[in-house]
Image (cartoon, grey):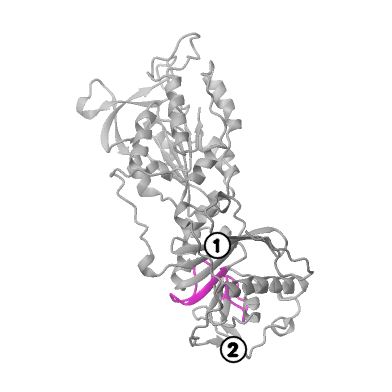
C-alpha cells in the first residue's frame, strides 16, 4: 500500500492513502470482492460516436445529450461566465484544478479515456465537467436540477435525461448520492445510462464498513475495482470508489425467495462487528424490572449513532405490539430515536381492538389490526388487564393480548383475532437494501416469532431490534411474588438475547 504526498502549492488532490482490492478488514471488502482488479493499462482509445446537438436560445434541451465541439474553449472563466454567476472566483478555479487531478489519475489507470463520453451527476456549478474537458475528455456534460449551459443541462441523479447505455464514464462528486431521498433510484439510473464495461467513480464521505457495504449493495450492477482515501477540495477526507459495470452475462438477478420457504441467511461479518460495540446486556435479574429496564434506555447504543445509513433505499420502522400511539411510536421512536434526518415509513401492528380507533386518525402510519404470528390463521386471544381493575381503561394502554390457542382447539370465551405470518410479511415489505428497525412487545410470543424469523431468513432484513422479553418477573403489586402470567424465566430471556447477538443481530433489551 503506497503513501503519496504532494508538498507543492498546487490544488491537485493530496492522496492520503491509495487502496486497491486487498482482502483486509481495513478495505471493508467481503470475501467475494477479494482478489486483484488493479487496472494499470494505458488509455483505451476507442472510436468516438457522433452525437446530435440541439441548442435553443443558448440552452440545451434536457431530453438531448449535449455534445460540445473542441472549438468551444471552456478553459477561460470569462467565456462562460458573467458578473455574479457561480463560474467565477479563485475557489471555482481551484475546484476545476482539483478535479482535473482526479481525472488525470483515472486516465492513467485506464478507467477514463479522452474518447469517453462522460457524465457528471448532480453538479451545481460544473467544475468537474470543465475539468474533464481540460484533461481532454471533451465529450462531457453535467446534470443538475437547475441547468447552467453549456456545462450543465437539466436533470437529476435519479432522473437522468438520457437514453440507455449512453456513457462510458459517470462521476458523482458533490454528495448527490448521500442527499438523494431514493439512492436506489439513483443507482438504477446509473445502471441504465452507463454502458457495460463503463466506469463509475463516486466521492463519498462514507467512513464505516456498514455504509460502504450498503453502497456496494446499491450498485450490484457493477463490480468494485478499488477504493482510495483522498483529501477533498476543502481538505476534508473523502473516499473515492471506482466501479465497473458488469456485462449482461455476468449480472445477477435481485429476486428474493418466497417468504414461506425456509431460507436461512448468514449475517455478514461487518454487522457482527457492530454488535460488539453494543451496550452490555443486563445479566443479573432486576428486582424492579419496570424501573431497571426503563433506565437502561439511556445506555442503548443506537445503530444510527455508530454508522452512516445514507446509502439505504428506504427507512422503515415496524412496531410489533404497538399498543397506543403514545406507548412507543409517539413518545420514543419519533422523538428520541436518532434518524440522521431520514424520513421513516412507520408500520404499527396491534391486535387489541381497544387501540384500533386511535390509529384511524394518525397520519403517516400504516396500521395492521392483526396479531403477528408464525402462520396465517384465526386465533383466539385473551385480553390481559390490570389485575386491580375489572374494566380496561380505554386509551391507558392497559389492555394487552396474549395468544392462548388456535381456533381448532378453542375452549372458553375469548376474543377472535386474525394472525398473520410476520416473517413472511416482512420479507414481502422490505429488502436488504432498506434500513429496518423493529420494536417487538408481543406478550411472550417472541419465543415463537424469533425462531420463525431465523428459520425463514427474515431476521437478516432487520438492522436493529428492540425486544421486550416476557418472563415470570417480580410483581410490582406483591413484593416477593412472581407473575404467574408467563412461564419463561429471566435466564431464558437472557439466552434469547445472547443467541441473537451471537448470530450478528443488534438487539436491545426493551421494557
Residue 116: % across, % down: 53, 79
Left or right: 192 as drawn, with respect to 279 = left
- Give the numbered dot on residue 69: 2
Which quadrant would residue 493 be assigned to in this image? top left
Quarter of the image with the N terminus is bottom right
> Residue at coordinates 55% horizontally, 76% vertically from top-left?
118
Q: Residue at x 56, y 87 (%)?
A: 56
- Nearer-the-camera pick, 490 or 316: 490
Query: Looking at the magenta stretch, what is its main secondary structure?
Result: loop
Q: Position of residue 225 (x, y in %)?
A: 52, 64
Farthest top residue in view: 480
| Viewer-proximal residue among 429 and 401 | 429
N-terminal-most mark, 2 or 1: 2
Q: Which mark is residue 292?
A: none
Residue with the mark numbered 1: 226
Around disc 1, counting alpha carbons within 10 Å, would you say few (fewer than 14), some (14 to 19), or many (20 or more)?
many
Range shown magenta: 142-171
Amino acid at each position: 500500500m503506497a503513501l503519496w504526498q504532494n508538498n507543492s502549492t498546487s490544488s491537485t488532490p493530496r492522496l492520503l492513502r491509495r487502496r486497491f482490492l486487498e482482502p483486509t478488514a481495513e478495505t471493508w471488502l467481503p470475501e467475494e470482492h477479494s482478489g486483484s482488479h488493479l487496472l494499470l493499462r494505458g488509455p483505451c482509445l476507442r472510436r468516438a460516436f457522433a452525437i446530435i446537438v440541439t441548442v435553443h436560445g443558448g440552452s440545451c434541451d434536457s431530453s438531448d445529450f449535449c455534445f460540445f465541439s473542441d472549438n468551444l474553449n471552456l478553459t477561460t472563466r470569462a467565456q462562460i461566465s458573467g458578473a455574479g454567476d457561480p463560474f467565477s472566483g479563485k475557489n471555482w478555479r481551484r475546484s476545476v484544478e482539483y478535479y482535473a487531478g482526479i481525472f488525470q489519475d483515472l486516465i492513467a489507470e485506464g478507467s477514463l479515456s479522452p474518447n469517453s463520453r462522460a457524465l457528471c451527476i448532480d453538479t451545481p456549478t460544473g467544475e468537474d465537467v470543465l475539468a474533464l474537458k481540460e484533461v481532454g475528455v471533451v465529450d462531457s456534460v453535467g446534470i443538475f436540477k437547475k441547468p447552467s449551459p453549456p456545462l450543465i443541462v437539466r436533470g437529476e441523479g435519479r432522473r437522468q435525461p438520457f437514453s440507455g447505455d449512453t456513457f462510458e464514464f459517470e462521476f458523482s462528486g458533490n454528495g448527490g448520492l448521500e442527499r438523494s431521498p431514493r439512492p436506489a433510484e439513483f443507482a438504477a439510473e446509473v445502471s441504465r445510462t452507463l454502458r457495460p464495461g463503463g466506469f463509475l467513480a463516486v466521492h463519498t464521505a462514507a467512513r464505516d464498513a456498514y455504509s460502504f457495504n450498503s453502497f456496494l449493495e446499491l450498485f450490484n450492477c457493477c463490480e468494485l475495482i478499488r477504493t482510495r482515501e483522498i483529501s477533498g477540495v476543502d481538505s476534508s477526507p473523502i473516499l473515492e470508489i471506482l466501479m465497473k459495470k458488469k456485462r449482461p452475462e455476468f449480472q445477477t438477478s435481485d429476486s428474493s425467495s418466497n417468504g414461506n420457504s425456509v431460507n436461512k441467511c448468514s449475517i455478514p461479518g461487518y454487522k457482527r462487528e457492530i454488535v460488539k460495540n453494543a451496550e452490555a446486556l443486563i445479566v443479573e435479574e432486576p428486582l424492579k424490572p419496570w424501573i431497571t429496564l426503563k433506565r437502561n434506555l439511556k445506555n442503548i447504543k443506537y445503530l444510527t449513532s455508530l454508522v452512516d445509513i445514507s446509502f439505504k433505499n428506504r427507512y422503515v420502522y415496524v412496531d410489533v405490539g404497538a399498543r397506543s400511539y403514545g406507548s412507543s411510536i409517539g413518545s420514543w421512536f419519533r422523538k428520541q430515536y436518532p434518524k440522521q434526518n431520514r424520513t421513516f415509513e412507520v408500520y404499527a401492528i396491534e391486535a387489541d381492538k381497544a387501540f384500533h380507533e386511535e390509529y384511524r386518525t394518525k397520519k403517516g402510519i400504516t396500521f395492521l389490526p392483526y396479531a403477528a404470528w408464525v402462520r396465517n390463521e384465526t386465533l383466539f386471544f385473551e385480553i390481559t388487564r390490570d389485575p386491580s381493575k375489572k374494566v380496561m381503561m380505554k386509551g391507558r394502554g392497559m389492555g394487552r393480548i396474549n395468544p392462548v390457542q388456535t381456533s381448532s382447539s378453542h375452549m372458553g370465551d375469548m376474543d377472535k383475532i386474525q394472525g398473520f405470518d410476520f416473517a413472511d410479511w416482512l420479507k414481502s415489505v422490505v429488502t436488504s437494501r432498506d434500513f429496518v428497525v423493529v420494536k417487538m412487545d408481543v406478550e411472550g410470543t417472541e419465543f415463537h416469532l424469533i425462531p420463525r424469523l431465523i428459520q425463514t431468513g427474515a431476521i437478516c432484513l432487520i438492522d436493529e431490534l428492540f425486544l421486550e422479553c416476557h418472563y415470570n418477573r417480580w410483581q410490582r403489586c406483591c413484593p416477593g411474588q412472581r407473575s404467574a402470567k408467563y412461564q419463561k424465566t429471566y435466564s431464558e430471556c437472557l439466552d434469547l438475547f445472547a443467541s441473537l447477538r451471537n448470530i450478528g443481530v443488534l438487539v436491545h433489551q426493551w421494557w
